[in-house]
Image (cartoon, rainbow, N blue to C red):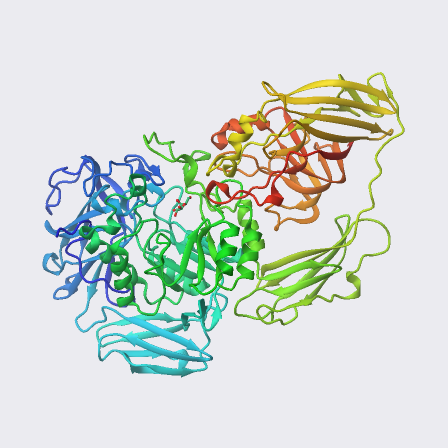
Amino acid sequence: MTALGRPEGTVRPRAALHTDAPSIDLSGAWRFRLSPTADAGDFWAADFDDSAWDTLPVPSSWPMHGYGRPAYTNITYPFPLDPPHVPTENPTGDHRRVVDVPAGWAGERVLLRFEGVDSLGRIWVNGAEVGFTQGSRLTHEFDVTAHLRPGESNVVAVRVHQWSAGSYLEDQDMWWLPGIFRGVTLEVRPAGGIDDVFVHAAFDGGRGTLRVDAPAGARLSVPGLGLRDAAVNTDHLLDGVAPWTPETPTLYDATVSTDAETVSLRIGFRTVAVVDGILTANGRRIFFRGVNRHEFHPDLGRVVPLEVVRAELALMKAHHVNAIRTSHYPPHAALLDLCDELGFWVIVENDYETHGFEQNGWRNNPTDDPRWTDALVDRMRRTVERDKNHPCVVMWSLGNEAGVGRNLASMATVAREVDPDRPLHYEGDRSCAHTDVHSRMYATPDEVAEIGAAAGGLPFVLCEYAHAMGNGPGLLTTYRELFERYPRCQGGFVWEWLDHGIRRGNQFAYGGDFGEPVHDGNFVIDGLVFPDRTPSPGLAEVGAVFAPVRLVADGDTLTVRNGYDHRDLTGVTLEWTLAVDGAPVATGTEPAPPLAPGESAALSLPNGAVAPPGAGEAWLTVTALAGGLRVGAGQLRLREAAPRPRRSGRRFAGDTLGPAVFRAGELVALGGLALRGPRLDLWRAPIDNDIFGRDPVAERWRAAGLHRLTHRVVSVASGEGLTVTSRVAPAGSDRAFEATYTWTADDDAVTLALHVEPTGDWDVPLPRAGVALAIPGRCGRVEWFGGGPGEAYVDSDTAALVGRYESTVDALQTPYVRPQENGNRTKVRRAVLTDPAGAGLELLGHPTFELTARRWSTAELTAARHTDDLVPGRDIHLHLDAGHHGLGTAACGPPPAPEAWLKAEPFDLVITFRAL
Ligand code: GAL
């Protein structure tokens, strides 16, 4: 039977090792030529004249360097489904590189190693073909000893085809980016050296069991555990071992040596096992607070510099992410070294996805076709072999969205053959016939609860949830509650870490921006961090929801709970601040009580931490710190605000009421400040969660005409104040909102009490419920007392703490790659917008309102496709809302929870306006 899609001529896969054997790094400038088809002509002879060619860095994704263009599809293959054939138009990159090989390498066995070539690389050394890679994110090594000329210049030539049979196995939701995008090295394999090592380091109650499989006669040393020149291939029982966990990533330096070679290892002791239906590490339940991580860089494509990786892992740590799924292929090998060191659980996924076959009824899916078995087994074997020595690797995954079929069994078998100790994951087969955990993506909270409550069964994980596309995700606390309630619901992995935008000037491009005939638009922009890895508000929410030290108001006390899985709270400091109306009046620091994992206690703080006599809203804020990192925060309201008096007493005369001037029932000036509005406004610039998914609410909003409401002033009645009634309705419909604006004033300020009644059958939720007004653009400084510092919405407000904040209108914006509603500050009691001279507008809530301020209208925001489409206008547009529809995560997953729906019901909004 033909074996489709496999590499040829490679040596047996083995572990990635740090060795003292000589090697030559072939990164750097290579000669490069791009051709539109696969048959570009001979170029591999050592004496071929490539002087007219360009140079290209290796590693690289060539479309990022001006050759061809990136293309994005999610599910659909960008070529006809005609396996194993690919189009004649097959961009092909020929690469050449001269390398001086030391004379001292004569007589040595030498391998040429490729860490990542997308999608197929044919390799020649000094004109002799040695084989080809196939499996873009997999390591391939070739024995080039016979073709290498030590002491001379040698030519390595690589022809990379963008499309190959292997492309059918690599339908991951990401940019199609051909190239030699990871390292290339020449490596000496010394005679009597150590080609491969397999570390087995188990932990059981203070005791470690270490066995290192290595060539017979090799010696093992672990100085930190007193092992010197010990035997390999045998068990060593070791006392006094500290376990490896993501919270306590203890690693022991080790070496395995022969006379010819020394390999350096970092060993972490941990035992991962499914016990009574629960996935455990060292006997304790694992709780994944995870993210899915792709390898992508906005300027370099699939090449991610190591310092960028380090910084992004630090950012994950700072937001209490403890697990990574390497969606949907093995990562750069160095990632796993860092995950060992910093402490993350990692699900390493095979480089395998065939999602586009689903659109054709899964006909001819490679997962169930014996012609592809070899290729799939080869992929799985390479995945496990390379990364088997990492304590961070908790499970292997057979791949993603590849349907079902016989080859799942073949892949599972080889994974278990190579590594019997690690559980297997695969989401695409609901029968779980080949896996050790039950995995789902985007299951609703109800489904998760049902799975959690069912008797028996496998450990359950959400390999993807909380789709972080655009503004969102909501619902994180809902899922956390389920993970905490049901022991077998062991957490999940947010989809996904990073927006895969491609930098273009000041903004980021997404699908369709490169003229792709078939593409999936901005579905590739669905991360917790922006393409340049700056955090989005979603990451702040993740950080607050995943935070291990939980400080929760419970009646009139604050309860502290240790949410770590493996460590107590020794060394955690609690910093408290008492503030009245947002102004700090006392602070202090206390050690956290030394609670064990899962324990909680009521917090007792010193006497200073009680509200001082007097009026004013008093809050106690407690922040938990460990090792310089914020590991939790919570608040307790010690005294409620006294109700704010509404301004009244002035009569309406002429056009004025107190300091306010009205025209045709609308406020046009306040003190010296020109204003327009406030007017009822129910529209928001739909967020991705409104637009995408099964039943997009934005379509219903548009059908209902909520983006094109018209206003008809029905009555204006003045006397003791001013009362304006207005009927607000879309063209063509007899449904409406009746708005009653009741204005009262004293000499200093004016109070608006708005009451809104929907009439007719509004069977849709509302985007927002509030008023819009415009003020002069010079009032760009903002201060507020309310939730902050970041953007927050009703189902994504864990990170927002009540306090006093200041910012600018410009800085309140969140630059979502596809512009959409953003920037709301929640539960605002008081806000001030001022110009540089301090003149402006004060807003006082009765008791609170939601605040959005921007330099463009909601209509402009709705129309924008990229951030550069947003051009500041003359005015600042203010939205003062009684509420917003929740964010949910419906772009892929459930809509907001019922309590976060903004129902079309009567509402009130009361705000005092004062000119400054
Ligand atoms: C999942 C898939 C991911 C991504 C996500 C949507 O179905 O596994 O790769 O496509 O949906 O963003």
Residue 123 vertical placement versus 825 (above, below): below
Q: Quadrant of residue 408?
A: bottom left
Q: Say which of 267 and 881 sits in front.
A: 881
Q: Is residue 12 left or right of residue 526?
A: left
Q: Quadrant of the C terminus?
A: top right
Q: Is residue 53 left or right of residue 787?
A: left
Total marks shown come to 0
Q: Position of residue 177 (x, y in %)?
A: 30, 42
Residue at 67% x, 46% y: name it. Answer: 787
Q: Quadrant of residue 63?
A: top left
Q: Say which of 219 and 106 sits in front.
A: 219
Ligand 1 is found in the corner quadrant, namely: top left
Q: Is residue 775 left or right of residue 871?
A: right
Q: Say which of 889 and 704 sits in front.
A: 704
Residue 623 visible in image = no
Q: Position of residue 685 (x, y in %)?
A: 55, 31
Q: Is residue 590 left or right of residue 152?
A: right
Q: Position of residue 291 (x, y in %)?
A: 46, 53
Residue at 32% x, 74% y: name it. Answer: 255
Residue 339 visible in image = yes
Q: Say which of 571 and 686 sits in front.
A: 686
Residue 829 vertical placement versus 390 (above, below): above
Q: Position of residue 782 (x, y in %)?
A: 68, 37
